[in-house]
Amino acid sequence: MPPPRLRGRLPRLPPHLAAVAVGAAAGGAARHALSARRSPWAVVAINVAGCGLLGGFSASSRLAAGPPALGPALTVGFCGGLTTFSTYVLGAGGLGGGERLAYLAASNGGGGVAAVLAGMLCRRLGL
């Protein structure tokens, strides 16, 4: 409880904020463990996998029927912590010419395709 002089002045935080924070910590830890090679292509694989998870979670009817904090914890928290835009940009900057183009196409195209396919699969399987 805040001190008496601050009561009524502090904004109310959404009740699922802690769940998002826990999800983000888990996603960040998973990214760190998976990217031990420090290769730009490891970042592409992680980002594409994260996009697939996000597409699947977003399409999941079971997730929508679950506890209210579960969806934000998995989508915003875990997938947000797992994927990384800053490392993606740094990786692209460290590559030259054709390899940079392949990197950008694989990350952007692969992420979009993974999200759509995972969403379609979840709907088809009734997940």
Image (tube, rainbow, N blue to C red):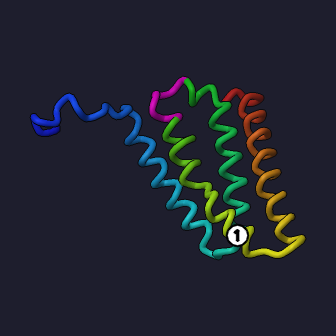
The residue positioned 54% from the left and 23% from the top of the image is 65
Q: Relative to the observer, which residue lies in front, 56 or 103?
A: 103
Which x, y percent locates residue 4? 10, 34
Q: Count the marks: how many?
A: 1
Which x, y percent locates residue 107? 77, 57
98 left or right of 13 in image = right
Q: Relative to the observer, which residue lies in front, 96 or 109?
A: 96
Magenta highlight on residue 66: yes
User: Which residue sits furthest right?
Assistant: 98
Which x, y percent locates residue 53? 66, 45
**Circle 1 is placed at which residue position?**
91
The residue positioned 17% from the left and 32% from the top of the image is 7
Task: Classify 125 as above or below 109.
Answer: above
Task: Classify 54 as above or below 94.
Answer: above
Magenta highlight on residue 69: yes
Which x, y percent locates residue 71? 53, 34
Quadrant location, the C terminus: top right
Check disc 1: other Cα within 10 Å, few if <14, some if 14-19, many if 20+. Answer: many
Q: Relative to the observer, which residue lies in front, 29 or 7?
A: 7
Q: Secondary structure at mark 1?
A: helix
The residue positioned 54% from the left and 53% from the top of the image is 81
- Image quarter for residue 42? bottom right
95 left or right of 75 in image = right
Task: Write the start and end of the magenta stretch as one range.
Answer: 65-71
Quadrant location, the N terminus: top left
Q: Amino acid at mark 1?
A: Gly
